[in-house]
Image: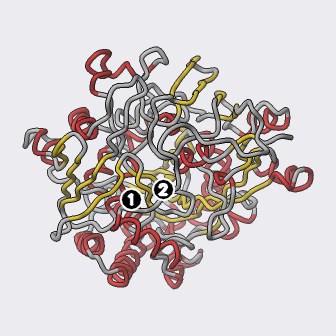
Amino acid sequence: MSRIKKSVVISLLSGILVVGATASGFAALPPDAVSEQIFDCHTRVEDGTYMDFMKTIYDRVGWCEIAWEPLVGFNKDLEVVPLGAKKWEVAKDGLTWTFHLRKELTWSDGEPLTAHDYVFALQRCVKQGYDFGWYWSWAAGIKNWGKVEKGELPVEELGIKALDDYTLSITTETPKSYLPGVLVWLYPVPRHAVEKWGDEYATRAETMVSNGPFKVDEWIKQDHITYVVNPNYHSIWKPYLKKVVCKYGTEDPEIGFPAYLNDEIYKCDLNPGQLAYAQENIPEELHFAPSFQTFYLTFDTTKPPFNDVKVRQAFNHALDREEMCSTVLKGLASPEWQLLMKGYPGHDAEAKELSKYDPELARRLLSEAGYPNGKGFPKLELWLRLEGPMMPIVKPASEYIQARLKEILGVDIVVRTMDMKTYQDALNNHTHNFFLAPYGFDYVDPSNFMDLFLTGGRHAWSNSEYDKLVKEADASWDWETRVKLYRKAQRLLLQESPAVFLMTQTRSMVWKPFVKGEGVEPNKDGIAIWNPMYLLYNLTHVYIAKR
């Protein structure tokens, strides 16, 4: 953890992390590479509408991560890497950051890419009611985001400005030492394409304009998306691969693993049954990686029955995380009792006691809340989010939760799987009261998770003391001070139980032995990172070797 923390802090503040890359052209092939560099892979199960991160996060299409390049990125060592920006500095007040862009950047259609495209991106988001808007308001703390979003200020007052074509200024409401890491989700938007075709520019290959190492060549809905190298890409992550073919549906292990075994795709996630098969038959192709993805029950604490803290605490103590992970999940997840999971900066090893499994305590708490043995407790719907990679975890976990809450507390639950948009709208707008929610890290800092529970954010729960502690930690430039404040806040969170933290995902996957390169090699902490957060890094740092 200390190595991760130190490397992140250094790279965040300096903005001058050195990355080896040639000034132009694509990466030269290693000696053992085949000449035809084609990578056949899966894509996201859910078929969204737009291949534009700044239009939508949750309704985006496929692995559009590789067609776009953000202002900065994370490499496999969790270090912030300058991408669109080549360097940056922060003012003495800690509020205003200045990013200096690479002057050689262009869009895939050859048009120049400038600081104005980043300004247009965030201004468009705030005007359209972006489905990831909370991130820019609370995680990034962009100045005046909330007031502009409500129409109280003009969009020009948003805390992002182009000082000239290649200098971008971003101002936050409070000091945030970790801001560059947050900006891994800040992508430019091609204003010229939007003005010509509207948002529909990002719905078909013929009009698709992007700025990443790859561009869309063919887009056959519900079948496949083919990406090819972008000849107008002039940044630093130049790929070996010449073509990436993403095949719909294959991220679902039930479809993907047979395709993998038949050499139709070169990488696949596994479900529990497939994991056992891989361990027995292809152990050399099997890999594990932590995801820093937490799963938790969350409630609308403003409405009965979850406005009573004793009800929430009863749920917290009624579930045996270790049993759930070792039985029904069979190694796909690790038990967790707090928001900042083991191995993540800020983890509090002693906080487990506040969420320990204690069925007698759970029954007593529910009885004190007025529901002895579940009598009179309303029937609940537990909503799951339809997301292919998560279903092997959330489906058996929800069935376990359903059975244990009935057995321990006498509470009846119906489990429902909802499409992504319906689920997210209900979660964000607080129109449903009971979810099994996943949340994966977006940047490496405790604030990424702790800010989730700030007043006015993703959840209905509000606590002024929690807000005070987290905001003070977010604003501090001293790491030890930040850790102490976050730990106080997390213990308050566990005591109030607006969420029941259950587990973190352990990713088990296979990839072909002929897929080689830094993108699949373990990082300095011995972890092979491969998930959507790193997909741009992965697929620009792998190649197909001779078999």
Q: Are marks 2 and 1 in contact (CB under 8 Å)?
A: yes
Compared with 10, 388 (above or below) is above
Q: Secondary structure at mark 1?
A: helix
At 43% from the left and 27% from the top, the residue drawn is 108
Q: CA distance from mark 2 to mark 1?
A: 8 Å
- In the visual, does 465 lie left or right of 487? left
> Which residue is at a point 44% across and 38% down the rendered structure image?
234
Which residue occupies 55% across, 46% down?
532
Q: Amino acid at mark 2?
A: Phe
- Image position of 194 with respect to 440: above or below: above
Compared with residue 128, is residue 1 higher up or lower down, i.e. above or below?
below
The residue at which mark 1 appears reads as 181
User: Do we see residue 461 in this rendering?
Assistant: yes
Q: Residues within 10 Å of mark 2 (few under 14, many from 20)?
A: many
Q: Any mark on residue 262, and which?
A: none
Q: Quadrant of residue 417?
A: top right
Residue type highlighted by circle 1? Gly
In percent of width and height, residue 374 lies at 52, 62
**Residue closer to the observer: 131 or 240:** 240
In the image, what residue occupies the spot 44% across and 56% down? 81
Q: Is 416 on the left-hand or right-hand side of 170?
A: right
Image coordinates for residue 227, horizontal then vertical, percent: 58, 27
**Residue 459 pos. (x, y %):** 34, 55
For mark 2, what is the residue? 74
Residue 467 is situated, as x and y percent measured from the top left of the image, at: 26, 69
- Which residue occupies the foreground of this view, 479 or 505? 479
